[in-house]
Image (cartoon, rainbow, N blue to C red):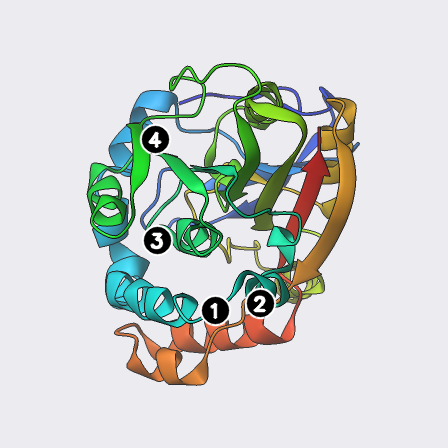
Amino acid sequence: MILHRKCPICHSESLRGYAIDTSRKGPHISRVQCNACELVFANPMADEKELVEYYTQYYEKDLYEAMDYKTLVEAHFARIKNLTPKTIKDDARYLRCLMEGTKFLDVGCGLGLGLAYANQFGCELSATEFDQGALDFISGHFNVKTFRGDVWSAGFPDDTFDFIHISHVIEHVLDPRAYVLEMKRIVKPGGYIAIGTPDISSSLYTLHRWTKLLRLQVPDVIDGLEHTFIFPKPVLRSLCEAEGLHVVDHYTHSLGEKLGNLIRYKMPLTQKINRLIQNFFQVNQWIVCRK
């Protein structure tokens, strides 16, 4: 475990307790918030060995198993196959800068939704991922070059990719700044990096926290316990700009969960209600940057 005495992003020593959750499984149980930049992060934080162990067969665990996630993703693949590049750009705003026939990297690709979209553009596909089961899954669906591990271990040459997609990954890593710097190194001049992650400045997080505090209860964690960092929208933007990236789009959006899927999920009713509530709040964010 790693104990932080300073904010990993702004290096302020002014930290306060934020939330704790001992009832669910995960590599972290407690979070703090930086009083200076308002970043929320796990503290103490699981180290690299512990996280690699946790992410082995990640998509066979807990929430993903309850959602029958692979079947759900394959249904998305079937839908995406009927989309054109133009309709994809309407469907996925963060891909509006993606051009046909370009080199596309999906960092922490998961089960490959980003790859499915890029495949419709005729892109040359590459992907990194810790979970070998996920890499086997995407290799069965796409012609994609894969690397098991994190992005800098892949050793890509400078200025390799036209577009880098990293969806709900940066909140899982130990050093977000290093990830941003490595992606900047391997994207071509004029190329794009699209980062999707939760937005801790969402009114849902604030409402939940104050509901607990007014009841004289310690706030718990309402997103994934595996998250190491939860970024307020301004902090994510300033991180990208500080590393010399130009922000071309930055927006928030809801979970977008379909009611029919929620009914089918094999999870407790309280979890279904929690996911339904997230449809009414802007809980996630995308930032698109150009090098």
Lower sequence index among marks 4 and 1: 4
Kindly state the secondary structure of the residue where label 4 is placed: helix
- Label 1 packing within 10 angstroms: few (<14), some (14-19), many (20+): some
Kindly state the secondary structure of the residue where label 1 is placed: loop
Lower sequence index among marks 4 and 3: 3
Q: Residue at x 64, y 37 (%)?
A: 192
- Label 2 packing within 10 angstroms: few (<14), some (14-19), many (20+): some
What residue is shown with label 1? Answer: 83
Query: In terms of depth relative to the viewer, which is nearer, 249 or 59?
Result: 249
What residue is shown with label 4? Answer: 51
What residue is shown with label 3? Answer: 24
Q: Is residue 28 visible?
A: no
Q: Amino acid at mark 4?
A: Leu
Lower sequence index among marks 1 and 2: 1
Q: Residue at x 52, y 23 (%)?
A: 160
Lower sequence index among marks 3 and 2: 3
Q: Residue 284 sits in which quadrant? A: bottom right
Q: Nearer the viewer, mark 4 or mark 3?
A: 4
Going by the image, does 185 lie left or right of 153? right
Lower sequence index among marks 4 and 2: 4
Q: Are marks 4 and 1 in contact (CB under 8 Å)?
A: no
Query: In terms of depth relative to the viewer, which is nearer, 136 or 79?
Result: 79
Q: Are marks 1 and 2 in contact (CB under 8 Å)?
A: yes
Q: Amino acid at mark 1?
A: Leu
Q: Nearer the viewer, mark 3 or mark 2?
A: 2
Q: Residue at x 39, y 17 (%)?
A: 153
248 in relation to 48, above or below: below
Going by the image, does 184 lie left or right of 104? right
Q: Is residue 212 visible?
A: yes
